């Protein structure tokens, strides 16, 4: 094995080893039936970027004395009230965003911890061809119908369900346990994941759902949830963090939930899709205890934006047609 191979193998091992591991003094609380107790209200809001900034290279963690400066820079970078380039209309003002006030407590430089460079791995040639074709089509047909728009814009699916990626707002969760189920209420788009723990077989492959078919089990004190049968189309199912992403029928997500202290669940999700990605990749996010309560997010009921997008494009088309006729 070469010197570089040894170095990268070591970095990969360190990347998957959580910094915020459970202390020797911590004893995982138990439910009355003996399972590790994960119940409560939790949030994954964070200023930590999804992918590691390229200028950081292989730097996986910030030093403690760097955190304050990094957080100040991230607040400025993500401030929705900052001045925009000419022609951009922006989004909601910053009051409505909920990115948290700091980076993850593990001090990681990105939410992606594997590959070791903290970046989404390359796509397969076939998947890259599909993304290129979609991009080309979107440039010519940005809003012919609602189906041309992102799933987030249509209030169909956000990135906070499976896997549980932070979004710009509504990053709260409620976990409820029974002896044979774990239920996760996802604030964004009011999804509810009901995860059987009784060893039942998965649903047939042709029965696809937007949040997939999940089965859970405990490995020691860690809840492991495997999800397959994830419905897909040509748009990304990974939310705002990865809007230009893609998936197919081979997507499988393996999540791990581990209590590390009274106010933290360490969450890891590994994304496997061998016909889309050249390798699996893993995200790690500490879920911190949240005060609550959780309110319903009525996205579709208040979705005036999608109608305005479509009507705006129709207005542009009429204006172009009028101009072509010399009116």
Image: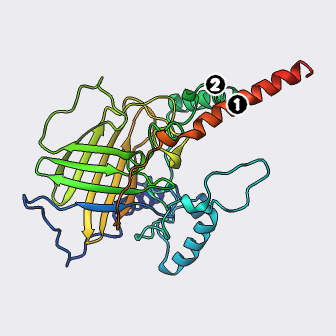
What residue lies at 49% left-to-right and 34% top-to-bottom? 124
For label 1, count other residues whose C-alpha is less than 10 Å away and answer few (under 14), some (14-19) or many (20+).
some
Residue 86 percent across, percent down from the top left = 79, 51
Query: Is 34 placed left or right of 162 in the picture?
Result: left
Label 2 and label 1: CA atoms lie apart by 8 Å
Give the quarter of the image for residue 108. bottom left
For label 2, count other residues whose C-alpha is less than 10 Å away and answer few (under 14), some (14-19) or many (20+).
few
Residue 196 percent across, percent down from the top left = 18, 42
Query: Is 155 placed left or right of 162 in the picture?
Result: right
Residue 8 percent across, percent down from the top left = 44, 58
Above or below, 291 relative to 176? below
What residue lies at 58% left-to-right and 66% top-to-bottom? 74
- Which residue, as the protein is rendered here, is positioned at the far left? 33
Query: Is 140 placed left or right of 198 in the picture?
Result: right
Residue 42 percent across, percent down from the top left = 33, 62
- Which residue, as the protein is rendered here, is positioned at the far bottom? 65
What residue lies at 30% left-to-right and 23% top-to-bottom? 206
Q: Name the residue tied to disc 1.
A: 313
* Disc 1 secondary structure class: helix
Residue toward you, 312 or 287: 312
Quadrant containing the C terminus is top right
Q: Name the residue tied to disc 2.
A: 144
Q: Which of the colour schemes (rainbow, by chain, secondary structure, one colour) is used?
A: rainbow
Above or below, 77 relative to 92? below
* Disc 2 secondary structure class: loop
Quadrant containing the N terminus is bottom left
- Which residue, as the protein is rendered here, is positioned at the far top? 325
**Labels 2 & 1 near each other (Cβ < 8 A):** yes
């Amino acid at each position: 094995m070469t010197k570089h191979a040894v170095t990268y193998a070591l970095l990969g091992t360190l990347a998957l080893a959580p910094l915020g591991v459970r202390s020797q003094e911590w004893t995982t609380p138990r439910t009355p039936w003996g399972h590790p107790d994960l119940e409560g209200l939790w949030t994954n809001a964070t200023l930590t970027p999804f992918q590691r900034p390229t200028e950081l290279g292989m730097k996986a963690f910030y030093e403690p004395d760097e955190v304050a400066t990094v957080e100040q820079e991230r607040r400025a970078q993500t401030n929705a009230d900052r001045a925009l380039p000419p022609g951009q209309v922006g989004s909601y003002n910053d009051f409505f965003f909920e990115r948290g006030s700091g980076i993850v407590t593990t001090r990681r430089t990105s939410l992606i911890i594997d590959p070791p460079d903290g970046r989404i791995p390359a796509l397969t040639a076939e998947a890259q061809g599909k993304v290129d074709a979609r991009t080309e089509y979107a440039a010519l047909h940005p809003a012919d119908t609602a189906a041309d728009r992102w799933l987030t814009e249509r209030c169909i699916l956000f990135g906070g369900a499976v896997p549980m990626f932070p979004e710009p707002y509504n990053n709260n969760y409620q976990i409820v346990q029974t002896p044979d189920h774990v239920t996760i209420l996802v604030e964004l788009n009011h999804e509810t994941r009901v995860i059987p723990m009784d060893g039942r077989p998965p649903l047939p492959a042709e029965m696809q759902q937007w949040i997939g078919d999940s089965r859970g089990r405990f490995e020691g004190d860690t809840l492991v949830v495997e999800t397959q049968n994830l419905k897909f189309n040509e748009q990304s199912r990974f939310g705002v963090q990865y809007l230009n992403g893609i998936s197919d029928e081979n997507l499988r997500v393996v999540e791990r939930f581990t209590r590390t202290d009274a106010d933290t669940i360490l969450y890891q999700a590994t994304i496997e899709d061998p016909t889309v990605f050249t390798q699996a990749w893993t995200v790690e996010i500490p879920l911190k205890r949240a005060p609550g309560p959780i309110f319903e997010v009525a996205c579709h009921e208040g979705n005036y934006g999608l109608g305005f997008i479509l009507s705006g494009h129709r207005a542009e088309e009429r204006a172009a047609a009028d101009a072509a006729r010399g009116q």
